[in-house]
Image: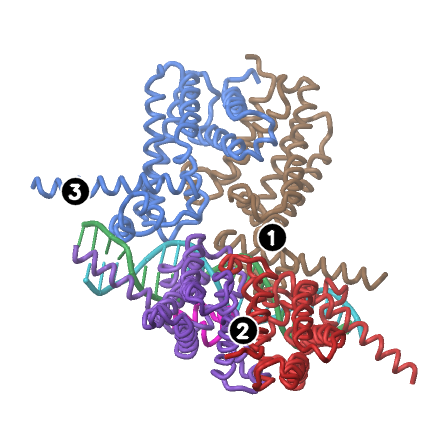
Chain colours: A red, B purple, C blue, D brown, E green, F cyan
Amino acid sequence: MTTADRREQERSRRKQEILQAARAVFAEHGFGRATVDAVAQRAEVGKGTIYLYFENKEAILAELTLQALADLTGQLQAASDGCSVLHPDRRLRALADAYLAFSQKAPDYYRLLNAYNHGGFQQGISADMREQIVRESNRTLDLVTQAITDGIALGLFAPGDPRQLAGVLWAGLNGALALVSHPIRRTLVATDEPGLYHATLEVCLRGLGKGQA
Amino acid sequence: MTTADRREQERSRRKQEILQAARAVFAEHGFGRATVDAVAQRAEVGKGTIYLYFENKEAILAELTLQALADLTGQLQAASDGCSVLHPDRRLRALADAYLAFSQKAPDYYRLLNAYNHGGFQQGISADMREQIVRESNRTLDLVTQAITDGIALGLFAPGDPRQLAGVLWAGLNGALALVSHPIRRTLVATDEPGLYHATLEVCLRGLGKGQA
Amino acid sequence: MTTADRREQERSRRKQEILQAARAVFAEHGFGRATVDAVAQRAEVGKGTIYLYFENKEAILAELTLQALADLTGQLQAASDGCSVLHPDRRLRALADAYLAFSQKAPDYYRLLNAYNHGGFQQGISADMREQIVRESNRTLDLVTQAITDGIALGLFAPGDPRQLAGVLWAGLNGALALVSHPIRRTLVATDEPGLYHATLEVCLRGLGKGQA
Amino acid sequence: MTTADRREQERSRRKQEILQAARAVFAEHGFGRATVDAVAQRAEVGKGTIYLYFENKEAILAELTLQALADLTGQLQAASDGCSVLHPDRRLRALADAYLAFSQKAPDYYRLLNAYNHGGFQQGISADMREQIVRESNRTLDLVTQAITDGIALGLFAPGDPRQLAGVLWAGLNGALALVSHPIRRTLVATDEPGLYHATLEVCLRGLGKGQA
DNA sequence: CATGAATGAGCATTCATTCAT
DNA sequence: TATGAATGAATGCTCATTCAT
């Protein structure tokens, strides 16, 4: 069934075009203010076509979120793989650096993840899609968790629930990014962007470490 | 001028009623999806009345944000005041506890602060109001900064830029709250709400501490 | 009843203040876009007070129109009185000059007259007021009619219905003013303001005159 | 490209339907008081559809004005073409008659032209459209100017600036129409509609003529 | 008399979604 | 399958008018 395959490929390609157009439009105006019209125009596609590929405007956001997460986990995975299993602290630094790099090199994806997390989307997004997103989010945290687990096993970090500690580190980094992402809020801490981020990372790493106390 | 006083009081009371109605409506539907109509209905007030007290829909959000911040700083101040100046670590714990309590006892205010921080509000809100909000936000961070400054002075914390370290701690706590504030995201870390929050607090405190390293 | 008199005087003065405020506000924004609020503010009077003196927003316009007409007829009367009864043509020129001067020195009144004439006001204005305005308008035209009657009687003008001929002259002058009153329309005739006006006047006067034909 | 042609035709037809509906609605209530809703209802079209064809409510007025002007110039052109070039006075009478006929047979178009001329429309109407309207207005006056130029050349009219004299005639006719267009103002001159109009025409023609004076 | 707070009908405009072709 | 014309509910905001004090 080469014909069916072609069809499928074509369909997939079209979907990707729409997604990339949406990515740009959502980034420019924000999801709320972005219009389906603008997405269609940017994708050089009829407006109706969009609804052949997506249930909803929100469904586009969901799929894009999934894509952003996949991109992010890919980067994190690569960063993690590049580190010796013997130095979990270095691995965590590499992961954090990769996250920062992601937020800077793909700020639209980063904003998208925030948009998805903060909008109250329950009706427009299929349960299946939501589940996939949660699963993919988990993969992100798994990498951090693994490094911490290793660190504890190696006696580098104080004992504790690795999953929770991964959450702590990730929460810290996310909070740092959020704090400096807005020019006005950035003035609150009077630091440049990577400054607060790395400071947060170091504080957390020290906090994880095997202190004498 | 009892008459003028009365008038002023009445006006202030009405404004508060509208603000409280808006607080509820914004919390329920989110600022973006909330309608001025709904606020008016909830406040049992004509729609036009709203515009006697506020320039804009966004102006309501701004004033509410300011109120939320004032409430928060009040709680934090009280918590801070209740602690001996000799134990900055306890003071930070008290501050963090007060922040958690705030997010739990006034979740609508908490959501409001997030809404203000994430929406792109520049046009609808007066410069004066924006400035007040920044100033009040600063007061929040000042309390944390002070405790850290004291801790460093007392030799309890490692030397460093107190303002930045305050940002680190606050970013961590905010990140933790954000992570667990959404039921779906909470499953990621498989912890109950205060669990991650306190874990974050402890990690940060250890990280701030004068480690043996 | 000195008290009643005082009351009456006071009332009249207040009414005038409101009218003058309205005159300014209507001139600035146009009747349609002017708000009662703005009139009240300018008159330094409570908004409700306006409705103690006027039925309607439109009633203000009507009264103002009447005042404008009274002013105009006053000017025209004076111009007419200043001319010898033996030279009706000079009298018409004087009347026309006075009208042009009026439109230039009291452009707000002039605009007001146009606004009244073009808006479709039937409901908001009392029959009595409408009648008074018609009567006052008639007085304007009477002065022109009289001059033309005299001119015909003196054999300076060709015989004809003086009332109709007065209408002709007045229509011409009004049309000229209307044509040049708007900067864009003025470009159509490529003339400065008084140019077209005086040309119209002269053409009409020649047309009225006892030609050889 | 029959499909594209059909589309274009259909689009054009729809636009015309909306324009004609607007023409009726604007004529009935006046532009200011007319609502887009009413236009949509009359055109038997969804309200949103209107905005597929027009930027603005004002854009509808502009296009309608252009149409009215085109109609008018068409009538005037035809009247002008039907007259010998040797009798400019007859040509002017024919032009004036055609104008009167236009104002009577298409009173809504006539009112529209007045509405456009008196409203303060600068923001809502594109510069291009404004220019077109000015150009079309010029064509109207050009016909009159031509006749007067011819008349002067033939020695039938006294020498003078033809453009200005055209403005004089047109101002007179417009003024006459304005004066009698409103039932109340008509009583001022105690004439039937065509009476004042023709009287104005004759006075102006005599005024243009080569009098002995 | 004077006030100005309150009202709510009214309006232009937007935009996600549908459906005939 | 692709299109884009059509829709109409929804929204923030205005303003003439009323009325309790």
Q: CA distance from mark 2 to mark 1?
A: 78 Å
Q: Nearer the viewer, residue A10 or C54?
A: A10
- Label 2 or label 3, whichever lies nearer to me, is 2
Q: Which amino acid type is marked by label 2?
A: Gln
Q: Is residue C83 visible?
A: yes
Q: Residues in magenta?
A: B26-41
Asked which secondary structure carries label 3, the reply is helix
| Residue at the extreme left of the image, as rendered | C1
Q: Residues within 10 Å of mark 1 (few under 14, many from 20)?
A: many
Q: CA distance from mark 3 to mark 1?
A: 50 Å
3 and 1 marks on the same chain? no
Q: Which residue is mark 1?
A: D60
**Residue at 60 percent of width and 20 percent of height:** D209
Q: What residue sits right under mark 2 in the picture?
A: B212
Q: Does residue A85 appear left or right of residue C75 in this picture?
A: right
Lateral position of residue D21 relative to residue B144, left or right: right
Dot 3 amino acid type: Glu
Answer above or below: position of C40 versus A188. Answer: above
Image mark 1: chain: D
Q: Which residue is mark 3?
A: C8
State how many labels appear.
Answer: 3
Magenta region includes residue C152: no
Badge 2: residue crowd in 10 Å (few <14, some 14–19, many ≥20): few
Q: Chain of mark 3?
A: C
